[in-house]
Image: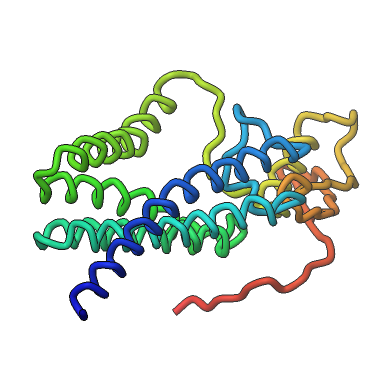
Amino acid sequence: MGEFRTNVQDRMLLRLGGLCGILGSVLALGMVFAATVISLWFRWDTNALSELGVGEVSFVFNSAVVIGGVLNFIFALGVRRYLSGRRVVRIGAALIMLSSVCLAFVGVFTVAYHFAHAIVSLGYFVSAPIGFILIWLGTERGTIRTPSIVTGIAALLAILILPMIFLVVPFKVGFAVPEDPATGSGNGCLAGYLVKHRYFGKDRIDIRVEQGYEIGRPSLLLLKAEEKGEGIDVYVGGKVAMVAKGQFI
């Protein structure tokens, strides 16, 4: 009786895992695509998908990756149960589970969290393909081996090869490089450049710079610069709000 109950539970987990695997891909990708359509500023040739995690469509995008991560985690549980024989398979399934957790955290630690976002994104992109390749190595079932190795290699190629192609070939494409909502150092250089080259026809400027609208954090900076002798005095100011702090040791 106990063995029968265990078999029933296993079959239920396998069916649930398979359903979640399908939904985790279709639903999450559909929501991400919807976010790109709804967004007023997103462009495939200049923006990274991660940038949708802040701004007016952040709820849709972040919900998509969180839901996708949760559903893929359940899918990985089913895979682990179904292919519970060899150790290398269990490790592969565990890596897919880890990648699912990282994917969910992409929706929590958005590009606004810089370092944390980079860690969870890297965890997802690295652990998922390695997990599928390990499953390919550890199982002899043809119906599992082929999709596992195809998925794993395709993911690795996308991670390792495509960035190199984009760096060499002059494509205009966006990467997940978060924008600073108020770049004091950059605007200071801009002020010096404008004065040096007499952009406004005089040796001093007093202007306003607006930045950060596309990532949902509009900012206003005040720039003053004046040429004095062989140098240029530059002043950058504005109101600030504490969002983080650190300490150099």
Furthest-front residue in this view: 1
Name the residue located 42 percent from the left edge and 56 percent from the top edge: 72
Q: Where is residue 226 in the image (x, y as percent from the top left)?
A: 83, 46
- Looking at the image, can residue 177 be seen? no
Q: Is 74 in front, or is 201?
A: 74
Q: Report which quarter residue 214 is drawn in.
A: top right
Q: Which residue is drawn at 33% across and 38% down?
A: 155
Residue 174 vertical position relative to residue 207 in the rendered view, above or below: above
Image quadrant where one finds the C terminus = bottom left
The answer to whether 172 is drawn above or below residue 14 in the figure is: above
* Residue at 58% over, 52% down: 64
Taking the image as shown, residue 141 lies to the left or right of residue 178, namely left
Using the rendered view, name the quadrant where residue 119 is placed. bottom left
Q: Residue 16: x, y in percent? A: 40, 59
Q: Position of residue 236 (x, y in %)?
A: 78, 56
On screen, residue 91 versus residue 106, left or right, reads left
Q: Residue at x 16, y 62 (%)?
A: 84
Colour mode of the rendering: rainbow
User: Is residue 19 or residue 186 the one in the foreground?
Assistant: 19
Position of residue 61 in the picture relative to residue 66 (left or right): right
Q: Quadrant of residue 193?
A: top right
